[in-house]
Amino acid sequence: QTVIAAESPLGVALLDLESTAWFYEMDGRALRPGLKGSKVRFLATLWVTSCITVFVSGPDGRAFGVHLNSAFAMVSVRGRPDGGRWGSGLEMYSGEMQELFRGVDPSQLKISLVGGWKTADHSRTEELRACFPEDDSMWSFSGVVRKWVAEALPGAAMDVSLLNRFEGLTGFAGQEDQSRAVLEGQRFGVVALDSRTGYVVAQTKYVHDSA
């Protein structure tokens, strides 16, 4: 497994708050090129376990990232208006992405989905089945995220090669079990998007950790 050494060019950039914009669980972040004095190039987040991080990159350095958990997605779809699909929570991030990439040809956008656990992906299937009885593609957390972002940015390419890469842990209790996830290699310690290239790097260790 590749490890981002703290002294490597990427490691230095990720540890430099002038080069990297960090966001955290239930948080979103946008990069807009051309801001005077800004040299931010990377979007990054930490500790991606059963959550899913969504990155979107464009051809001109615009980029967006959001770190979603299944509880938020479930609350959002349960609270959707009659005839609607997503509810205010996910719609808020849809609006932010659409505003950021306004005027960009959708075929020039790349969506990357990172994280998630196979064991947790269907933990809310019965609730989702009740919300979307005729659409079985929506009966998993990853299914909700995939369809939501595809509808928010129709025509954009989507990379799911880093989605649900881990089996996950049973009896996971949030922050209390983060150390167990680390020890068993069941989480991404850092996930970062290079806004200039659209390339995503994800690893189980954090930048400070030894190989």
Image: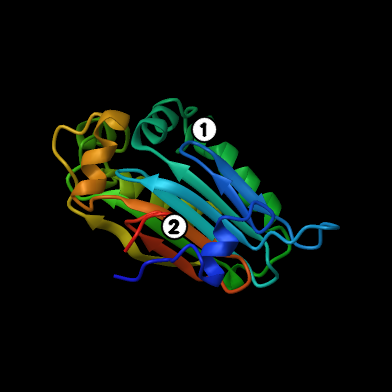
Number of residues whose C-alpha sits closer than 10 Å to that of mark 1, classed few (under 14), some (14–19) or many (20 or more): some
73 versus 49 height, above or below: above
Residue at 66% x, 70% y: name it. 105
Residue at 31% x, 38% y: name it. 132
Residue at 44% x, 47% y: name it. 46
Task: Report x, y in % for residue 124.
Answer: 24, 34
Q: CA distance from mark 2 to mark 1?
A: 31 Å
Task: Report x, y in % for residue 201.
Answer: 44, 66
Q: Nearer the viewer, residue 33 or 159?
A: 33
Secondary structure found at label 2 = loop
In the displayed structure image, the side of residue 84 where residue 135 appears, left or right: left
In the displayed structure image, the side of residue 40 where residue 114 appears, left or right: left
Q: Which residue is mark 1?
A: 89
In the displayed structure image, the side of residue 107 where residue 76 appears, left or right: left
Q: Which residue is mark 2?
A: 207
- Answer yes or no: is residue 156 visible: no
Task: Report x, y in % for residue 22.
Answer: 57, 48
Q: Nearer the viewer, residue 127 or 117?
A: 117
In this view, the residue farthest toward the right is 36
